[in-house]
Image (cartoon, rainbow, N blue to C red):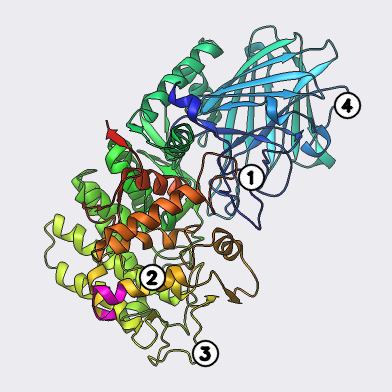
Amino acid sequence: MSRIQLVNIKQGTKSVPRFSAGNTLPLVQRPFGMAAFAPQTERNGSWFYNPESHSIEGIRLTHQPSPWISDYGTFLMTPQNDVIAASADGAWGGHRPKDDVMTPSYLKIRFLRSRCDFELTPTERGGAVRLHFDTDRRSCISFLPLKGTYTYTVYPEKNLVIGETTGHSGDIAENFRMYYAVKFAEGSVDLENAKIHKENNTEHTSLHVFVKTRDVEYKIGTSYISAELAELALERECGDRTFDEILAENNEIWEERLSRIDVTFDENEENMMRTFYTCLWRTFLYPHKCYEIDASGKIVHYTPIDGSVHDGVRYTDNGFWDTYRTVYPLFTLIARDEFAEMLEGFVNDYRECGWLPRWISIGEVGCMPSTLIDSVIACAVVNGIGERKTWEDALEGMLKHANQNGPLPRFGRNGAESYVKYGYVPRDEHRESVNLTLDAAYGDWCIAVVAEALGRTELVPEYLRRAKNYVNLFDKETGFMRGRDTKGEMADDFDPLKWGNEYTEGCAWQSTFAVPHDVLGLAELYGGKEAMIAKLDELFATEPDYRCFGYGGEIHEMTELAAIDFGQCAISNQPSFHIPYLFAMLGDPDKSTYWVHRLAKETMSWENDGFPGDEDNGTTAAWYIFACLGMYPVNPGEKEMVRITPIAKEWKIK
């Protein structure tokens, strides 16, 4: 069996806003590809796919990194006949989920209402589509609007349609456009009589292209820069190649990526193999490429901060608060060249915007606090990934956000200037002040590492001193990290089960141990390694209870903490990822092995509900990969990893 056949791209899709089993999408795309595709079963905000739904609205071109972030540059493709609807609400029909075929390289959905088989295989910036209608009824392929405004220009003499959409959400993306070129096979459609429908004279526009034959093929290219580059991408990536030739190339590409780790298991081999390679596949989806190749062969990209075009690479659709923990350390082992290019893209954002990215989805979203890209940069530097000039510019950006407040809350470290002034972020000035302080201290340590590597030794003592600022929040009486106000005082009504306020997506239990750069220093605050081990034992033994005060109500991460029932170790969310490995760092690797194996085997699988919480751009999938390999990057800014007994019987990284 090929590795592609082991992958379930629906892993984690059985999710709803109030309970996440991954909050993923069944994406058909190239590794880190600019264009991805997924079925849309129903409009439920950003939760547009349900693996058990018997309705199908169409196949969606999507860039969505998370339902909490939403989508951009998107449209829907739906085969129709009889009653032709101008929106998904009217165009939906039935399908049989058990008959769907979806692999990393290929999608086939049977649209029952229109009696049409819809097949798709992706390219880097588009894809190839093949339709077969089992009816002679007057049928069409419709391009339906989803977000923003849409315009279409039809060129019958070229068998070509050029579309344009402005849709994006939550980010800063000046003058955003996505252009898409759609080229149909000669003689298969009637472009002379294509129908462009504007709903109520608005730009909420749909396009209906009527077919001449039962079998129709077309190819897609996209661009964030121009219609010409969209058409050029189509010609370069598809050209005259057949659907099957493009599919075969995609299969080869994905087989190569999945073969970068060979693994075998002793127990429950088939399920473990399916879970491992499904998770490995997921780590190659994000971040998305966001650069193009112009007519002269030069690499260029759209720049969201001002809507201009710059030379060089760019990547997007990534939240570093999540991904720094596992994704980029894994890339140091299996995707070094790709990591180097990504780093260059992230630093290009700083060169063009003035601030290193934090949470980007075409433009800066900044939905999570802190600048954990510091860790990604340090991870690259200590592993020799990237160019010296890139490291130098990255350090410049790190120093800026470590000392200056950004022009908007989404840029830079929140509370940076207060942190410099007080040695912590005051709780009476900023929410989530404990996590802001701990992340800033870790970021300062990362600055010291990068500065040392670049020979900027004058910076090292100061930032190593600042890296100890986590000590300022440690409360010896309770054994927790707690916020202080501008007077240096802690709150009187402390409860370690209260979520929010001073903490990010958790309470004191999940947040206190966020000192990845100085675990032994943290142990000293407890009175030694044995005392800290006792505190970690208490964490796992404490009931998975929670208090809602800080959020004014329950958030889904609370529900998931209780559902997995591993005490206060919320492996359902990223702040707890390193916690079970701390035992090994303190001298008890057997206890780490026990908890890691249980958490991996009991909370994660290849099934549609295969994650214990939000998967977040490969983060949880990469955690599972590390658990199988018996190693973990507690501090991604170090080359060293913690070793425990692996779940896998044997493994080899190619």
At label 3, the amino acid type is Asp
Give the foreground label among 1 and 4: 1
Magenta span: 525-532
The relative height of residue 347 versus residue 652 in the rendered view (above or below) is below
The relative height of residue 546 versus residue 593 in the rendered view (above or below) is below
Q: Does 318 lie within the magenta span?
A: no
N-term mark: 3 or 2: 3
At label 2, the amino acid type is Asp
N-term mark: 4 or 3: 4
CA neighbours of label 1 inside 10 A, class few (<14), some (14 to 19), many (20+): many
The answer, for residue 339, to whether it is visible in the render is yes
Give the foreground label among 2 and 4: 2
Q: At 51% across and 60% down in the image, what residue appears?
A: 367
Q: Is residue 274 left or right of residue 191?
A: left
The relative height of residue 596 versus residue 275 in the rendered view (above or below) is below
* Residue assigned mark 4: 83
Q: Is residue 211 left or right of residue 429?
A: right
Q: Could you tell me if the residues under marks 1 and 3 are in contact, i.e. CB atoms within 8 Å? A: no
* Residue assigned mark 2: 537
N-term mark: 1 or 3: 1
* Residue assigned mark 3: 493
* Residue assigned mark 1: 14
SS of the residue at dot 3?
loop
The relative height of residue 546 versus residue 84 in the rendered view (above or below) is below
Quarter placement of the C terminus: top left
Quadrant position of residue 551: bottom right
- Separation (CA) of disc 1 from disc 4: 31 Å
SS of the residue at dot 4?
loop
Q: Could you tell me if the residues under marks 3 and 2 are in contact, i.e. CB atoms within 8 Å? A: no
